Image (tube, rainbow, N blue to C red):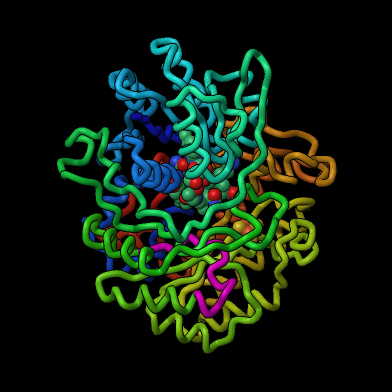
Amino acid sequence: MKVAFVAPPVPAVPLSRMQRLYYFYLFSSRAFTVFSHLTQQDFHRFWMLEPVHLGLLQLISYLEQHGIECSFFGPISPEGKHVDREEILLQKILKRADEFDAIGFSSITASYRTAARMAGRIRQEHPDIPLILGGNHAWVRYGEVLRESAFDILVHKEGEETTLELLRAMERNEPLHGIAGISFVEEGKLFKTPDRPRMDRSALPLIGYEHLEDNFAREELGGDDRLSIPISRVTPLTGCTNDCVWCADFWKPEVTGQNLDRFKEEVRYLMENRNSRFFYLGTHDFLHHIDRAVEIAEQMSSLQPEMHWEAQTRVNPAATREHFRKLREADCRCLHVGVESANQELLGIMGKNIRIPEVMRMLEYAREEEIETHTYWLIGSPLETYETARQTIATMSSWMRSGLSSTAEINMLVGYPGTEFYENRHHFDITWVEPDYSNYDGRNRPTFETTHLTSRDLEYLFHRAMDEYCSVMEDTIGTREQVTEKLGHRFPNFDPAFMEAAF
Ligand code: B12
Ligand code: SF4
């Protein structure tokens, strides 16, 4: 059996002048600190990050281990140039469609419309090829997706075991009703089978990076044989024990770990074969089991000095200064910490389960041990008002000025379909939600309004937060001209199509 797996592009959105300036400073401050060892060539290669779709590449390697042949189709903007990524990708698939027994798409909410459009075109030209959809949007809206799109079967949540069983059943022409974790329509009737328990992810094979180039011509790779991934995202731990009302991450409420040898092998592969020189440990709860975090840090440290790394974590009040010292000794350059709001009451309403003094203490320990800190902040937290947003902006700014937080990232809250925030709107005084899923990318526009804040208010507050960020940066690292001169040839390309992957 042979299957195509497609990562449709998230629509590129125009950035305002303020957003471009904000990204400029965000990027530059990191270029001078955590990315200081990256070269001009590494920076130039950031456009190569766009097609790296970890979920699909992991799914592919698992299926291949079980004898299913797979081909990966991803979007790319060669050398950062604007191209019609959707049409180019579609034509590539249509050209090879006859080779495949099924075609699977992955989509988040923002790329769902693109996926549905592409699937519709494939159905017109190849009506007999089964079309499957997985990823974070399909299963939360399975009824709507199955009714309105060309997709035949949806895979819910974790995909490996479900997809393998599904493909085997399709191959043998067996009924699908006994397969956990899917939905489909049969004789006009919609079926959803029970969810599947999480698998043991420590047994998974290495992510199928070797499939990245399956469908790229050499010129799309900038003349190279293979894509480089100068900044790699690796996930030694998956999941989070918390449950914020707006969070669309479905890997909850457990934190599961990769096998450490395999993790190290993945990092080594990326260093040796993909020119990776910086690693972002995309764990949501790195410090959840502190001893485990230290063990992971030691693995990273053993691979020095060619690379450096950072990790994302929740605040853990049990972490001591000694733990941070160990992380620093293992070359942890930065910790990313979600703070979201400076208002303790709002943190309670969103279910964040952190206390501001504990956040400050953890950031202080990190600073004392010379680990950079990158904090995340939201405009539009559940039940936000002008006053709470101002409080958040002022706190972010003062923490940055005092060095408590080295850098910060500001986002406008997006309440994704399937989350409590979106589904139980009346609890959060929501008066309107954006009907077009393509705008759920969290980048440029509000996706809801409340009795307290209109979309214009949200936009204003978001821009005000970015303006404040830029003022702090101007005072601490210099004016735009001074920073540009310092960056020299390591100047970033802010094309929205792939920029997200670089931060
Ligand atoms: C890593 C990550 C990124 C990375 C890499 C993304 C990638 N495509 O690999 C980067 C930084 C680039 C990124 C960017 C963005 N991300 Co992101 N990201 C994540 C994160 C933290 C982990 C994803 C992951 O690798 N999980 C592990 C793998 C194994 O799981 P998976 O991808 O879900 O895939 C499994 C199943 O879903 C299923 N499956 C998936 N696809 C398919 C397809 C088929 C056919 C089948 C059968 C099965 C299947 O099988 C896979 C294996 O089990 C998630 C949060 C989370 N934990 O899910 C957010 C998340 C997916 N991202 C999100 C968003 C919004 C974005 C951005 C739009 C952010 C922005 N403002 O720009 C961009 C969009 C970029 C893009 N082009 O997709 C949201 C999506 C919410 C939603 N419902 O839309 C999430 C859920 C975070 C959140 N806010 O809650 N992201
Ligand atoms: S702490 Fe982070 S990953 Fe965990 S539920 Fe909240 S937003 Fe999601």
Q: Residue at x 47, y 86 (%)?
A: 325
Quadrant containing the N terminus is top left
Q: Is residue 499 visible?
A: no
Q: How many marks?
A: 0
On whether residue 270 falls in the magenta region, the answer is no
Closer to us: 394 or 187: 187
On whether residue 288 falls in the magenta region, the answer is yes
Instruction: Please give left or right for residue 338 compared with residue 345 in the image.
Output: left
Q: Which region is colored magenta? A: 279-292
Instruction: Please give left or right for residue 361 compared with residue 297 in the image.
Output: right
Residue 154 percent across, percent down from the top left: 56, 31
Write down the quadrant of residue 32 in the picture: bottom left
Instruction: Please give left or right for residue 113 compared with residue 213 in the image.
Output: right
Q: Residue at x 74, y 59 (%)?
A: 351
Closer to us: 223 or 186: 186
Residue 419 percent across, percent down from the top left: 70, 44
Q: Is residue 39 visible?
A: yes
Quadrant containing the C terminus is bottom left
Q: Residue at x 67, y 43 (%)?
A: 415
Instruction: Please give left or right for residue 90 compared with residue 377 in the image.
Output: left
Residue 87 percent across, percent down from the top left: 36, 22
